[in-house]
Image (cartoon, grey):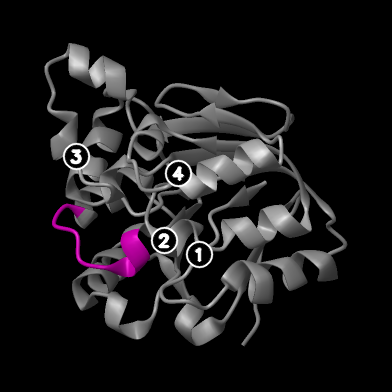
Amino acid sequence: MLFDSGTRGNYDVGKFVVAPFLWQEGIKKIDTVIISHKDDDHCNGIPSIINRFNVDNIFVNKFFLESGNKVELLKLFTEKRIKTGLLADELEIKGYEPVNIEVLNPPDKDILRKRGILVDNIPANDSSNVLLIEYMGNKVLLCGDIGKIGIEMLLSGGDDSDVDISADIIQIPHHGGFIMNTSDLVKRVKPVHGIINGIARDISSSTIEHYQKYGVCLHKTNKNGAVSFTISKEGISVSTFL
């Protein structure tokens, strides 16, 4: 499963970074691609991935589908005959057992409308697909770019405010940028490790302070390069490229 592939500008990270890495790992087929949301820095590398690998499924959400500015990308899915599905809170992604994959965000757009919530007021970042992945008793939380509203929706847990979103590893939202309620998220997730995939100017000192306050071990791709987490019977091991 591949979660996002993109970067700012015209550099093709799918072609020059992700594809060579996957080939090096002996991967020639991708069962599932998840696109968290519509921003280019999360999906402009996807076309090169689709053109270089056999991809079975692609999952987006209704916010992505109805954004109106990804017509060419959606057309490519059809041309390649890739099955496309929609994710929403409280769904699960099957087929990876014994790994459990839960979708925690966003809420279904139509359900929000029925509740009278103005979905047009939800920023693209806050509509990010958020996944909670559990394997061998360890959990990974992938947050995309959720911000203040996204964190509020995540912590509310839909109809279940007691939903357990604790995780050993968190992909820190929005490249480590400033988010007002970061502390609320860290207290609920209680991560051991946090990964920040962003350049130096993206990262807020306030965000760093919040995670360090709770003893989270931080890994930054702008300093460490690629960061790999391996889950085994012995627990979680971490390796970095730099």
Position of residue 61 in the picture relative to residue 146 (left or right): right
| Residue 186 or residue 15, whichever sits in front | 15
Q: Residue 40 got which mark?
A: 2
Q: Which residues are magenta?
A: 174-181
Q: Tell me the mark number nearer the camera, choosing from 2 and 3.
A: 2
Pointer 3: what residue? 122
Q: Is residue 236 above or below residue 72?
A: below
Q: Amino acid at mark 1?
A: Gly
- In space, the residues marked 2 and 1 are separated at their CA atoms by 6 Å
Q: Amino acid at mark 3?
A: Ile
Q: Residue 71 got which mark?
A: 4
* First-in-chain label (2 vs 3): 2
Tell me, yes or no, whether the two marked residues, 2 and 4, touch with CB atoms within 8 Å: no
* First-in-chain label (2 vs 4): 2
Residue 59 x %, y %:
55, 36
Residue 193 x %, y %:
48, 62
Which residue is drawn at the image coordinates 72% and 56% (left, top)?
51
| Residue 103 or residue 190, whichever sits in front | 103
Q: Tell me the mark number nearer the camera, choosing from 4 and 1.
A: 4
Q: Is residue 232 above or below residue 135?
A: below
Tell me, yes or no, whether the two marked residues, 2 and 3, touch with CB atoms within 8 Å: no
* First-in-chain label (3 vs 1): 1
| Residue 73 or residue 17, whichever sits in front | 73
Q: Tell me the mark number nearer the camera, choosing from 4 and 3.
A: 4
Which residue is drawn at the image coordinates 12% and 28% (left, top)?
118
